[in-house]
Amino acid sequence: MSKTVDLNADVGESFGAWKMGNDAALMPFLTSANIACGFHAGDPRTIARTVALAVKHGVAIGAHPGLPDLVGFGRRNMAITEEEAYQLVLYQSGAMRAFAHAAGSRLHHVKAHGALYNMAASDPQLSRGIVRAVQALGDQVAIVVLSGSETERVAREAGLTVSCEVFADRRYQDNGLLVPRTDPRALITDEQESIDQVIAMVTQGSCISVSGRTISVRADTICLHGDQDGALVFAQALRAALARQSIAPRAFP
């Protein structure tokens, strides 16, 4: 196969007795995992279990730091400063790195979660806070960013290893940002439509926005939402569709 692409998912999002997703079933179909760090979801026991699953299946371990909002699952905007973004991301990612090291592995990347990710995508100050935290981690830790976002620009200027992310099940605005979840058009629920979007993004570097415009994207890594209904079936179908296009799944970079 001549082309490769990373397949990631947000995992480890259970908390205490509350369960979300089926990480054990989904993990074998991934090449990298973004593991919740305890602020928007997750807890120490869940982190340890999810890291162990990633190690077992040879999946690259990523920190998935979010806003301190368990009730809102980190999807509600909060007014935070650049310095607060730096501290939130460094604190959570440092904990994830400790769990990875304890399991005999390493922290491969950092990907901000939910509202923090989306706010930073158009906010250079929040992006600088996140980027500074990844720089402070050292160890060649990479950063996952929304393709074409402010976070990508700031991270590249800082010299970080950058992986541009696209979404299998999300629709895009004309400016390349994701359609907000408050918009009923935000999620793609049809499996074939999601697969067609992914293939176009990987092979052509483009996708169609909600208004019908063709927008350019860079697809280094594809996000599969593990908390969606049918996530496992979709992951299997997507892997098969990529294979038909001679595209092999492999962790970046």
Image: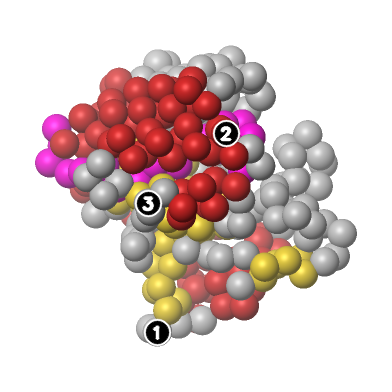
Q: Is residue 36 above or below residue 178?
A: above
Q: Residues within 10 Å of mark 3 (few under 14, many from 20)?
A: some
Q: Nearer the viewer, residue 212 or 25?
A: 212
Magenta residues, as a range? 102-121
Give the vertical position of 213 relative to 177 (above or below): below
From the viewer's side, name the closer residue of 92 and 248: 92
Label 1 and label 3: CA atoms lie apart by 26 Å
The three-letter amino acid code for the residue at tag 1 is Ser
Q: Is residue 192 visible?
A: no
Label 3 to label 2: alpha-carbon separation: 17 Å
| Nearest the eye: 116 or 37 | 116
Residue 184, quarter of the rendered image: top right
Residue 226 sits above or below residue 168 on the image? above
User: Label 3's element?
Assistant: loop
User: Percent from the top left, x then y, of residue 4?
Assistant: 41, 73
Q: Are there few (<14), some (14-19), or many (20+) residues within 10 Å of tag 2?
A: some
Q: Position of residue 250 (x, y in %)?
A: 35, 65
Question: SS of the residue at dot 2?
Answer: helix
- Give the amino acid at mark 2: Gln
The residue labelled by disc 2 is 125
Which mark is in front, 1 or 3?
3
In terms of sequence position, does the residue under pointer 1 or pointer 3 come before the other? Answer: 1
User: Residue at 56% of width from left, 22% of height from top?
Assistant: 81
Residue 2: numbered disc: 1
Residue 56 part of the magenta-drawn span: no
- Disc 3 marks a residue whose amino acid type is Leu
Magenta-drawn stretch contains 111: yes
Residue 160, disc = 3
Horizontal side, residue 68 vs residue 178: left or right: left
Q: What number is the disc on residue 66?
A: none
For the C terminus, the quadrant is bottom left
Question: What residue do we see at 67% from left, 68% from top?
Answer: 216
